[in-house]
Image (cartoon, rainbow, N blue to C red):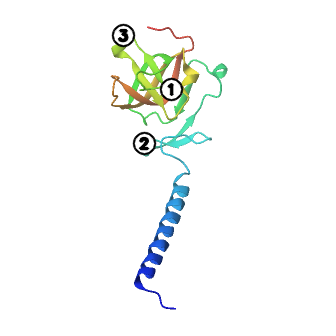
Amino acid sequence: MKQNSSDTQLMIVAVLSALAVFLGVGAGYLLRAKPTGVLSENGGGVTESGTVVTATVAQDVASIKAGDVFGSTDESAFKDSAQGYLEAGGLNGEGSHALLRAGGDSQTVYLTSSVTDLDKFVGMEVKVWGETFQGQSVGWLMDVGRVQVVDLSGTKP
């Protein structure tokens, strides 16, 4: 049986398509292991800048004490910091929490965290360290990498 060039081209396209799908699935499988900026179950992770960090995570609110530090154990990993009263909720879809500080709304820091669960610190006065990002509608947006509990029963400014 003799194949014409059209059949040969069709077979080449089919083989190359199947190979591309196979390689794509294989690459996805290999890359899914640990996404950047997220802690693994044992408390290790990688920041967006590529810095490897180890972290402590608050297990439950009852075990938290003033002075406790959670998140990255590397004090130099984050250059920005702020201190204030933590409440849940962002603004216009930016941030999952707000750090209220003296001076009114213009001093509020909107927070997200890829390192620790900020919900455990709501209602407390905390000091946070992280990386500042450009917000769309907020003045200050920070990805928190480290949290220190200053006062368990913080007061809103």
Quadrant occupied by the C terminus:
top left
Q: Which residue is mark 1?
A: 147
* Mark 3 burial class by Cα count in 10 Å: few <14, some 14-19, many 20+: few
Q: Residue at x 49, y 61 (%)?
A: 24
* Mark 1 burial class by Cα count in 10 Å: few <14, some 14-19, many 20+: many
Q: Which residue is mark 2?
A: 48
Q: Which residue is mark 3?
A: 104
Q: Residue at x 50, y 63 (%)?
A: 21
* Label 3 – label 1 distance at C-alpha: 22 Å
Q: Is residue 140 above or below residue 155?
A: below
Q: Is residue 32 above or below residue 81?
A: below
Question: Which three-letter amino acid code belongs to the residue tagged 2?
Answer: Glu
Which is in the foreground here, disc 3 or disc 1?
3
Name the residue at the bottom extreme: 1
Percent x, y of residue 77 = 43, 37
Q: Is residue 35 above or below residue 103?
A: below
Q: Residue at x 35, y 24 (%)?
A: 140
* Label 1 – label 2 distance at C-alpha: 18 Å
Percent x, y of residue 17 = 47, 68
User: If you read the primary sequence from the N terminus, does the residue marked by circle 3 or circle 1 appear first?
Assistant: 3
* Label 3 – label 2 distance at C-alpha: 31 Å
Q: Residue at x 46, y 25 (%)?
A: 128
Circle 1 SS class: strand
Percent x, y of residue 89 = 48, 20
Question: Which three-letter amino acid code belongs to the residue tagged 1?
Answer: Val
Label drawn at residue 80: none
Circle 2 SS class: loop
User: If you read the primary sequence from the N terminus, does the residue marked by circle 1 or circle 2 appear first?
Assistant: 2
